[in-house]
Amino acid sequence: MGEAGNEETAELRVLAAPTQQLPALIPALSHASPDAPADEPPLTRRWRWPLLALATAALASIPIALFATSDSPNARQQMVPPQWPPAPTMMESTPALPSPPEESVALVAPPPPAAEVPRHLSASATPSPSPTAPAPGSYEAEAPGNRLGGRAATREVATASGGSVVGWVGDHRDNTLTFTDVTVPAAGRYRVTVHYLTEERRAAAVEANGRFAQIVDFPSTGGWDRVGTITVTLTLRAGENTIEFGNRYSWAPDFDRLVVEPSAG
């Protein structure tokens, strides 16, 4: 048996104590000590022993009844030891707090990020590019098809469009630069923008398709590595054309490129 059995045994020992004290209690119940004189009334002597027997039987039955009550299975089931903390049924019930309301679902979903838009939608939403005018023709002075006459030669310039220019043009009739294969769609007047370099003011004669056109004055660009522009108007024929620069009397500027576009006038 465990701790419960020990408690029951101790209880029996406590309850059995009156039985051990019966010799002292019996004289008290008979209202006479064991050494009572023999000259008591006859009635008292007649009922003494029946009363003692009844008292003895009554005292003897007390521990037996208590033992049977405390040791029975039903008593053990009914004697529940105290618990701490008390069971939920014994504790004061706490009212349940109202649960927070659930968040309502948004009725309108946010738009997807730009990266997640289907490609077919973005492609259909993109307008088709409008047609643009063809870029004007650009012709490099150092292009292999051009003709360099006399002492004319190329030199490298980092600020030039192609990294090189043609110099030493002029100061003799043979020192010339001729742009070949300048192609235009129709005959007419065209704006020709000359990209050049010179540290001082210089001039050059211009011929179109072997015919003299005009003398062009070239202001200083601020250095032999700084590119400037000047625009002249020339009459060209449909298809391929040649444009020549030279100066038989003095030096012309160094040439970077030509840009040819239709004239507005």
Image (cartoon, rainbow, N blue to C red):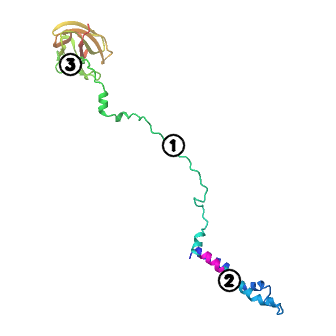
Tag 2 residue: 60
Tell me the mark number nearer the camera, choosing from 3 and 2.
Answer: 2
Q: Is residue 176 left or right of residue 8?
A: left
SS state under label 3 = strand
> Distance of mark 3 from mark 2, alpha carbons?
148 Å
Q: Is residue 143 left or right of residue 117?
A: left
Check residue 68 for magenta coloring: yes
Against 145, residue 70 (above or below) is below
Q: Of helix, strand and loop, which mostly describes the magenta segment?
A: helix
Tag 1 residue: 101
Query: Which label was assigned to residue 153?
Result: 3
Amino acid bearing label 2: Ala
Mark nearer the N terminus (3 vs 1): 1
Amino acid bearing label 3: Ala
Amino acid bearing label 1: Pro
Magenta stretch, residue numbers:
63-71
> Distance of mark 3 from mark 1, alpha carbons?
88 Å
Against 252, residue 109 (above or below) is below
> Distance of mark 1 from mark 2, alpha carbons?
71 Å
Residue 20 at x, y = what percent? 70, 84
Query: Foreground: 155 or 52?
Result: 52
Query: Foreground: 231 or 84?
Result: 84
Q: Are marks 3 and 1 in contact (CB under 8 Å)?
A: no
SS state under label 2 = helix
